[in-house]
Image (cartoon, rainbow, N blue to C red):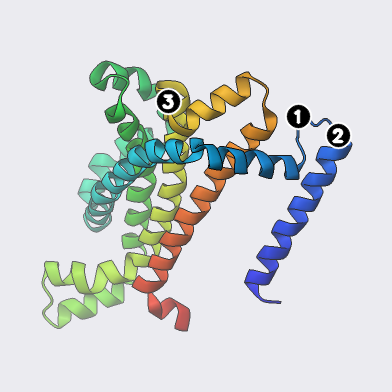
Amino acid sequence: MKPNTLRLLSLITLALIWETAGRTGNARLLPPFSKVVTAWIELLVSGQLFQALAISLQALAIGFVLSVIFGVPLGLLMGRYRRLESFLDTYMTALLTVPMISFIPFLVIAFGLGLHSRVWIVFLFAFVIIAINTTAGVRNVDATLTEMAKSFGARERELFLKVILPAALPMIMAGIRLGMGRAVLGMVTSEMILAVVGFGAMLMTFGASFNSAALFATILTIVLLAVALLALIQHLDRRLTPWRATS
């Protein structure tokens, strides 16, 4: 059975189980899947989903792009130069382990409750994992490749562009995929805690009014958005690393 067929079968099975559980159990806690779909269509027709999507994507796109722009080069440098990695290791570990919501009060003081703070939260959620994965990718490059390139007279710039970067690209793209997942989490967190806008506002409103069907419809929209963005990055990964498919 093909992977796409299995995925479709998995989704149909989940929908059937969800529908059955919603009709036989507590509908307020878990509404039937059909009611969630109806609520989703109503939100779509009313324009609420499009408005929330426009607001949420703004912070998500800016924050994630910045995390890639800064995370990948820093990870390449940390992976290549051990002294730099040793110098920054404590800070990277701290950013990886400290809950990102602990930075919210500082961001509010520095940037207020607007877009800037939400962008910074998305950036912090995604940046560290991208940088660490990139560092690991450089560390895992076969030493014989770099030694062979050096023996043929390759300079440091050529080593980076022609040997290290292509060899580390699979791990870099894996880090970017993980970073996107964390960026979506940061987007929702910032909207629920920092500024009640976008999808965060919808989650808070529907949760407070016990509108379970609309609440699950909003959650489903966020999940679909994350899946679509991850699929886009995976497609880009296949385009950038075609040798992995053939191997």
Give the amino acid at mark 3.
Ile
Q: Position of residue 206 (x, y in %)?
A: 60, 25
Residue 165 image-quadrant placement: bottom left
Q: Residue at x 56, y 46 (%)?
A: 223
- Mark number displayed over residue 29: 1
- Left or right of 15? Residue 207 is left
Give the amino acid at mark 1.
Leu
Q: Quarter of the image containing the N terminus? A: bottom right
Tell me, yes or no, whether the two marked residues, 1 and 2, touch with CB atoms within 8 Å: yes
Q: Residue at x 27, y 15 (%)?
A: 109
- Left or right of 138? Residue 56 is right
Q: Nearer the viewer, residue 230 or 224?
A: 224
Give the amino acid at mark 2.
Gly
Circle 1 packing at 10 Å, graded few (<14), some (14-19), many (20+), is few
Q: Which residue is mark 2?
A: 25
Residue 110 image-quadrant placement: top left
- Left or right of 200? Residue 38 is right
Q: Secondary structure at mark 2?
A: loop
Q: Residue at x 16, y 76 (%)?
A: 150
- In the rendered image, is residue 99 in sight? no
Tell me, yes or no, whether the two marked residues, 3 and 1, touch with CB atoms within 8 Å: no
Q: Position of residue 149 (x, y in %)?
A: 19, 78
Is 175 placed above or below 140 here? above
Circle 3 packing at 10 Å, graded few (<14), some (14-19), many (20+), is some
Front tag of 3 and 1: 1
Q: Residue at x 10, y 72 (%)?
A: 155
Q: Position of residue 148 (x, y in %)?
A: 22, 80
Q: Which residue is mark 3?
A: 101
